[in-house]
Amino acid sequence: MSQVSLPTDQILKALKKTMGKYVSSIGSYSETQWNDKPSADEWSMGQLYEHIAMSTSGYFCYKINTCLRRENGSESLNIMPGGLKMYQHNSFPPFKFKVPQGLGDEPNPLPQSTYTKRFANLMEQLEDLAEAVKKDNGKFRSPHAVPEIGALNANEWLQMTEMHMRHHLKQKAYLDEYLMSKQN
């Protein structure tokens, strides 16, 4: 199967740009705003940041590493049509998702001040992983929790990380609008 993801350097550049959009807003929310939820079944801004931090380190970086170490996957696994479509568009589908059961509880945010360093550490970790991904042959794949996506190689997981962060920028914009409307 041919490469469906972008070149690693292009993904890394996009990751820095997308991560920068989160980092540039840290510190601009009051403690009340950080924890304010539009409704009982929606996340606060703090929960969104925690989700990005935890899913990046605990899921996406983990999956990249499993591919690089050739663990919990196989060279015989494939990306599925749903996954191919995401990579063809370099984007998640434009609708809200429910986190698959077993992938995590409702995020419990830390103080806003901790996220500048956390996101800097995440970016450093992603840069290190990208260097290793460049040396990987891309044949080993690890399955995604969503079966319709299929199994991804290390470079595809790196791109999925950026697509996930970018997808949540829509949620961040929604929350920013919600918080702004409460000030008026």
Image: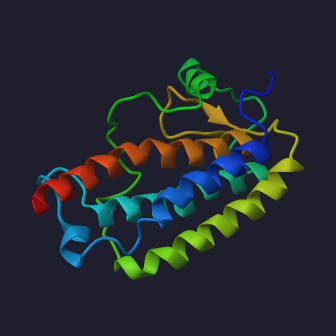
| The one of 16 and 4 positioned closer to us in this rendering | 16
| Residue at 88% across, 40% down | 137
Vertical arrangement, residue 143 with respect to residue 35, above or below: above
| The one of 115 and 99 positioned closer to us in this rendering | 115
Q: Position of residue 180 (x, y in %)?
A: 20, 57
Vertical arrangement, residue 169 with respect to residue 65, above or below: above
Report whether 75 appears left or right of 126: right
Q: Position of residue 36 (x, y in %)?
A: 17, 65
**Seen from this angle, which residue lies furthest front?**
184
| Scheme by which the image is coloured | rainbow
| Residue at 18% across, 74% down | 32
Report whether 19 appears left or right of 105: right
Q: Please state, as top left, top right, bottom left or bottom right, where the N terminus lies in the image.
A: top right
| The one of 138 and 24 positioned closer to us in this rendering | 24
Q: Is residue 157 visible?
A: yes
Q: Position of residue 162 (x, y in %)?
A: 58, 47
Task: Please tell me how many numbered marks the rendered image carries.
Answer: 0
Tell me which corner region of the image, top left, top right, bottom left or bottom right, holds residue 8: top right
Q: Is residue 69 visible?
A: no
| The one of 91 and 154 positioned closer to us in this rendering | 91
**Seen from this angle, which residue lies furthest top?**
81
Q: Please state, as top left, top right, bottom left or bottom right, where the C terminus lies in the image.
A: bottom left
Q: Position of residue 101 (x, y in %)?
A: 34, 46
| Residue at 41% across, 47% down | 168
| Residue at 28% across, 59% down | 106
Report whether 121 appears left or right of 77: left
